[in-house]
Amino acid sequence: MEPRHQRTRLLVSLLLGGMIFPAGAGLAQISRSSALIATRSISADAALTIALEAMRAARERQCQEAVAVVDQGGTLLVLLRSDGASQQFVEGAGQKAWTALNLRASTRDVLATIQKGEQDDGQLPFIPKALFLMGGVPLEAGEAVVGGVGAAGCVNGIDDDAVAQQAARAFQRLIQR
């Protein structure tokens, strides 16, 4: 095999996660069962329920809050905002939910990791759409992350985090019924 073809084969192998396919391997060799994946996601009804719980928690803290819930793919399912909650809070809630989902950790924890600066976590703030402020929490069903919730608008991030955590606990109660 020519060196140029060897490099191409190596590059393709690396791009496919180290899998090396025999010459001529193609689409026809993929079985039906490996062509489909099953995913789990929070339902729209559950998203609305936990968003309402978050809004109650925000009201108790006297926050003008926005709350967003995204599904397992990061698509917005529910967005609620209190009277007086600004566009900044609306956008922030969605970004926090998206960040928690995609990094599979609370934005509070990720922020703490970034601030430690022990590894290359300083690169995380450059992720488009991500927001590293307290108030984003992943929604989990067992080992699977099935969505995310974000809260923005309290005077401090500790309260935003508490609102999102309360929504995540409400989700856990729903799935344990």
Image: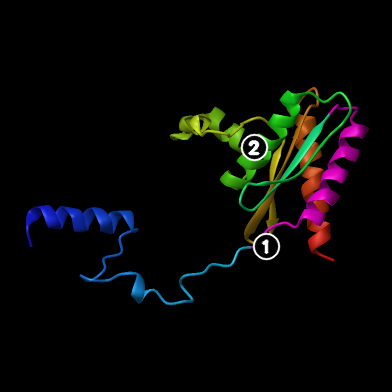
Residue 143, percent across and down? 63, 61
- The crowd level at tag 2 (other Cα within 10 Å; few <14, some 14-19, many 20+) is many
Q: Quadrant of the N terminus?
A: bottom left
Give the image quarter of residue 103: top right
Give the image quarter of residue 162: top right
Q: Secondary structure at mark 2?
A: helix
**How many numbered marks appear?**
2
The residue pinned by badge 1 equals 142
- The crowd level at tag 1 (other Cα within 10 Å; few <14, some 14-19, many 20+) is few
Identify residue type, mark 2.
Answer: Thr
Identify residue type, mark 1.
Answer: Gly
Q: Which residues are magenta?
A: 40-64
Residue 78, percent across and down? 77, 45
Residue positioned 32% across, 54% down in the render: 15
The way the protein has been coloured in the rendering is rainbow
Q: CA distance from mark 2 to mark 1?
A: 20 Å
Q: Secondary structure at mark 1?
A: loop
The residue pinned by badge 2 equals 107
Residue positioned 35% across, 75% down in the render: 28
The main secondary structure of the magenta stretch is: helix
Image position of 131 (left or right of 137): left
Residue positioned 79% across, 62% down in the render: 175
